[in-house]
């Protein structure tokens, strides 16, 4: 099984992190110190998609390399960030539950097989957690067939991840249409079918929805609420999230290929300062 043979590679690549940190400049050292400060009432949410074992992904919004992802996760841990779930964020907003000093939410869109093969064991190894927003109509899809370029993980793999406590599976619709361009019937189908399938296949409550392409209107938002979603998330926005922002249209920061750990920390810090 790939996860069993992957651990030596994980350990090997994690050894690269101290080498990277030891070579930072004086300016970068100042940024690391700045990143040690608590977030206050601000919660950044990161957005990932696919992880490639190797290849040129510089500046690509949908891919990071395996080495980049490992270094970024280790950098978050070293900087004192604690990953939280959307359920914890909901309790923070609605019930005044306390969060760690430096909370952060990690998300993935679409449900690519690489999330299971690479992200899952890395997060598990580092004691971190994440949410994967899946396309229920593409579970187990094979890369290169139809509209699917990269393979997607199966329901069985989704169940393994969700039951581990490391990964929370939530909805990204059924087939990823731009909901703003659809009629009411299609919007309802995408919202309700994906939620139904997740609850049926995984035996859990699905109450978080990530808008395909980050596109929504007030009408779409209202239909999502009627369908049973308590939290909705967008994409491509600057800044972070606070209790006063509520639980709708939460901002997410896309992590682009080519970013190392220091660049990721700097990007997070800059967005914390936006609000």
Image (cartoon, helix red, strand yellow):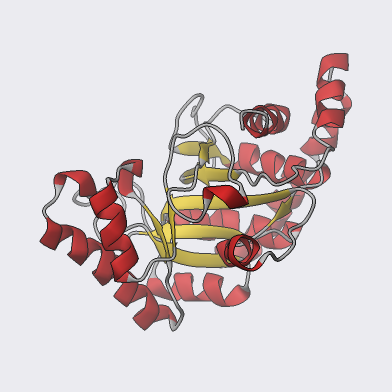
Q: Can residue 261 be spotted in the picture?
A: yes
Q: Quadrant of residue 164?
A: bottom right
Query: Residue at image x 45%, y 77%?
Result: 205
- 42 or 270, nearer to the observer: 42
Query: Residue at image x 81%, y 21%?
Result: 28
Work out whether 260 lies above or below 85.
Answer: above
Percent position of residue 126, x then y = 75, 57
69 sits left or right of 245 in the view: right
Percent position of residue 91, x then y = 62, 67
Percent position of residue 58, x then y = 51, 24
Work out whether 168 lies above or below 29.
Answer: below
- 145 or 220, nearer to the observer: 220
Q: Can residue 141 be spotted in the picture?
A: no
Query: Residue at image x 62%, y 72%?
Result: 165
Percent position of residue 158, x then y = 46, 70
Q: Quadrant of the C terminus?
A: top right
| Residue most extreme to the front | 244
- 109 or 206, nearer to the observer: 206
């Amino acid at each position: 099984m790939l996860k069993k043979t992957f651990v030596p590679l994980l350990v090997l690549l994690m050894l690269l992190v101290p080498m990277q940190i030891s070579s930072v400049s004086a300016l970068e050292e100042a940024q690391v110190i700045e990143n040690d400060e608590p977030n206050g009432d601000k919660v950044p949410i990161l957005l990932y998609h696919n992880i490639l074992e190797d290849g040129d992904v510089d500046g690509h919004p949908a891919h990071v390399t395996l080495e980049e992802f490992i270094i970024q996760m280790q950098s978050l841990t070293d900087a004192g960030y604690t990953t939280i779930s959307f359920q914890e964020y909901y309790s923070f907003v609605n019930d005044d539950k306390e969060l760690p000093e430096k909370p952060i939410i990690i998300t993935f869109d679409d449900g690519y097989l690489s999330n299971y093969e690479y992200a899952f064991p890395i997060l598990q190894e580092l004691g971190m957690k994440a949410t994967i927003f899946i396309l229920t109509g593409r579970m187990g899809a094979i890369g290169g067939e139809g509209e699917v370029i990269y393979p997607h993980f199966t329901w069985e793999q989704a169940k393994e991840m969700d039951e581990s406590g490391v990964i929370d599976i939530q909805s990204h619709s059924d087939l990823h249409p731009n909901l703003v361009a659809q009629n009411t019937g299609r919007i309802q189908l995408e919202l309700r079918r994906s939620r139904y399938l997740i609850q049926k296949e995984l035996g859990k409550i699905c109450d978080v929805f990530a808008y395909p392409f980050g596109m929504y209107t007030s009408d779409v938002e209202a239909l999502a609420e009627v369908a049973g979603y308590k939290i909705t998330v967008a994409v491509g926005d600057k800044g972070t999230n606070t209790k006063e922002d509520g639980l709708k249209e939460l901002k997410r920061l896309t992590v682009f290929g080519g970013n190392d750990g220091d660049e990721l920390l700097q990007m997070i810090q800059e967005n914390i300062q936006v609000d």
